[in-house]
Image (cartoon, grey):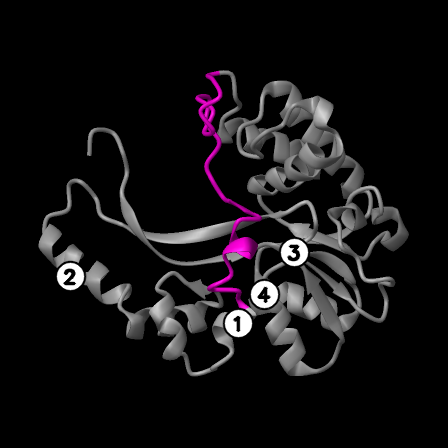
């Protein structure tokens, strides 16, 4: 409406730092473990395989190199994007493999070929349930990137009333509880917390922890018009895609 998109969120989560608790000591509390500290685990570091991962590097730089002036990890000027890319190129020398399929990361940690890297809580839960490897997770002190999944309604939907009924259903406590557990995320409908099959689900995913959620910088598509409203001199996602190809080589 009037150029503004609307939707209803159904769940959210953080991109965490996960590590093999036997191989990585002391327990890390910073993304420095996979950036300047990556050479210590050369060949056994993993990272998410997507141009949006550039934001993870930008977030780290915003805290450790304030002179760069990064205020929002998705609103990067050409110079800021280049700085994040340089950090990721250095990290690349220590990466064993990138992941996009979470089952591949589970296999990598359980085989020992990977011992530290970015991850999701659902991946940690899967590894813990298998019991093959002792792992730890942390939302680092610099904060984290993350996601908020949302159902959207097309302005040109043929049957909008049907779509509204779907939205009412999917964010109901009962349905949202099922979605959150199946997908592995915090439900956006907190009344769902009383209805999950696993009674500690919302505690595990920090569903009602406002301080935890406030540390997450949710995935946002970079645009020339800075998404944080700071100006029109930011880099677009297309530029991030090109830069990611350069990083991976």
* Disc assigned to residue 121: 4
Q: Which residue is mark 2?
A: 165
Q: Choose the circle earlier in sequence order: 2 or 4.
A: 4
Q: Position of residue 22 (x, y in %)?
A: 85, 71
The quadrant holding residue 54 is: top right
Q: Magenta includes 89?
A: no
Q: Residue at x 30, y 75 (%)?
A: 174
User: Separation of disc 2 and disc 1 at Cα?
Assistant: 29 Å
The quadrant holding residue 92 is: top right
Q: Which residue is mark 1?
A: 203
Most frequent secondary structure within the magenta stretch: loop
Instruction: Quarter of the image for the C terminus: give it.
Output: top right
Q: Residue at x 61, y 43 (%)?
A: 53
User: Separation of disc 3 and disc 4 at Cα?
Assistant: 10 Å
Q: Choose the circle earlier in sequence order: 4 or 1.
A: 4
Q: Residues within 10 Å of mark 2 (few under 14, many from 20)?
A: few
Q: Are marks 3 and 4 in contact (CB under 8 Å)?
A: no
Q: Position of residue 97 (x, y in %)?
A: 72, 54
Q: Are marks 2 and 1 in contact (CB under 8 Å)?
A: no
108 above or below 67?
A: below
Q: Are marks 3 and 2 in contact (CB under 8 Å)?
A: no
Q: Which residues are magenta?
A: 205-232
Asked whether the viewer can see residue 39, the reply is yes
Q: Which residue is mark 3?
A: 139
* Disc assigned to residue 187: none
- Closer mark to the observer between disc 2 and disc 1: 1
Q: Tell me the SS state at disc 3.
A: loop
């Amino acid at each position: 409406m009037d150029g503004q998109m609307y939707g209803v969120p159904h769940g959210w989560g953080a991109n965490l730092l996960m590590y093999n608790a036997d191989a990585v000591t002391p327990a890390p509390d910073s993304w420095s473990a996979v950036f300047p500290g990556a050479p210590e685990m050369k060949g056994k570091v993993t990272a998410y395989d997507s141009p949006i991962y550039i934001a993870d590097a930008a977030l780290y730089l915003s805290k450790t190199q304030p002179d760069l002036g990064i205020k929002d990890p998705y609103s990067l000027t050409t110079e800021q994007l280049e700085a994040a890319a340089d950090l990721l190129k250095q990290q690349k020398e220590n990466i064993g493999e990138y992941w996009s399929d979470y089952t591949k990361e589970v296999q990598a940690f359980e085989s020992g070929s990977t011992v530290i890297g970015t991850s999701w809580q659902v991946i940690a839960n899967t590894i813990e349930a298998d019991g093959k490897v002792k792992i730890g997770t942390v939302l680092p002190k610099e904060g984290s990137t993350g996601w908020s999944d949302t159902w959207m309604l097309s302005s040109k939907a043929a049957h909008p009333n049907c779509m509204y009924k779907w939205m009412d259903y999917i964010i109901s406590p009962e349905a949202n509880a099922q979605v959150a557990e199946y997908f592995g995320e915090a439900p956006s409908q907190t009344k769902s917390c009383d209805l999950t099959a696993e009674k500690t689900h919302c505690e595990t995913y920090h569903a009602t922890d406002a301080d935890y959620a406030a540390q997450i910088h949710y995935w946002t598509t970079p645009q020339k018009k800075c998404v944080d409203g700071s100006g029109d001199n930011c880099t677009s996602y297309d530029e991030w895609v090109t830069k990611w190809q350069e990083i991976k080589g």
